[in-house]
Image (cartoon, helix red, strand yellow):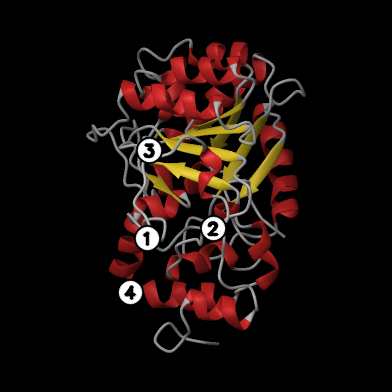
Amino acid sequence: MERLSDAPDFDTRLRRARQAPLRRARTTTLQVNLGLRCNLACHHCHVESGPKRTEALDAHGVDRLLVLLEQSPDVHTLDLTGGAPEMHLDFRRLVSGARTLGRRVIDRCNLTILHEPGQEDTATFLAEQGVDVVASLPCYSLENVEAQRGRGVFDGSVRALQALNALGYGHGALKLDLVYNPVGPSLPPPQATLEADYREALLREFGIVFDALLTITNMPIKRFAHALAREGRDQEYMDLLIANFNAETVSGLMCRHQLSVDHRGRLYDCDFNQALALDIPGATRTIFDIECLGELDGHEIATARHCFGCTAGAGSSCGGAIS
């Protein structure tokens, strides 16, 4: 096993696999971090969001996103994240605007937000707009969920899922996917096997149904990296990611087809690069510097050690396992 101290960097590993340089393909998804405010402060959060964060994309930025979507016909999906994106003042305006343009909209929902004051009709709004919900549920047991996300989160998540099911989510017409990420420094188990376990447990215990389970590897950055360092397990985890590099995942990396926007309107290759302020090579661009989201197609992608997290084992992306 190669150790962090003597292992090659990510670009070197790509060259060995004859897959360098890593370049953007056709952009089909625009992922927007609307802001860092959230009702939770999860241990694994790579953008370090929480209730006290105030950073948010302004109304001018929201207007610009809608213009760019209209001018970028290849981009068929708007993927909204945060923080809790539903807490953004222009969340509903952006969602309805994108749906009017015929775009698929994904809401990356922490579930408990649906019980917060002022959010009582959010689930109904999502259903009426035909928004796909990708909901974080790192386990189907109370102990594991609350170890990662805090006390009371599991019960709130279950009630939110039941409410979404009652609106038609998970029954075919409205899409409801769940997201799993490991509680500790390990790779996710096989996605199909874990999905079967989730289905059986959630249906048996709570009558909950869903469309798919997406397994996502924890990135060794920000809060999760700090926790690993406190436990003295940061090198162990990086060694694990590097040792399990899988060249077959590279073609499916989300950075090749997705463009990420932060709360300032700055553009990045992915949400993780955004968290690290790792700019797109060759230029520092914002949504106000381009006329079409496809302008960056073919550009080289910025990489660093954390990229081993997306290529370890079965791979990891915002859409779950890659291979």
Helix, strand or loop at label 1? It is: loop
Q: Residue 176: x percent and y percent?
A: 65, 30
Mark 4 vs mark 3: give the one in front. 4
Q: How crowded is mark 1: few (under 14 residues within 10 Å), some or many (20 or more)?
A: many
Q: Are marks 4 and 1 in contact (CB under 8 Å)?
A: no
Q: In this view, does 273 lie to the left or right of 70?
A: left
At horizontal 36% and vertical 66% (from top left) the residue drawn is: 228
Q: Residue 271: x percent and y percent?
A: 45, 48
Mark 4 vs mark 1: give the one in front. 1
| Residue 151, disc | 3
Classify the position of the C terminus by image quarter.
Answer: bottom right
Decide which of tag 2 and tag 3 comes sooner along the chain: 3
The quarter of the displayed image where residue 151 is located: top left
Helix, strand or loop at label 4? It is: loop
Give, as a three-letter code, the residue at label 2: Thr
Residue 228 to residue 139: above or below: below
Helix, strand or loop at label 3? It is: loop
Q: Cα distance, mark 4 to mark 3?
A: 25 Å
Residue highlighted by disc 1:
221
Q: Residue 101: x percent and y percent?
A: 60, 19
Residue highlighted by disc 4:
232
Mark 2 vs mark 3: give the one in front. 2
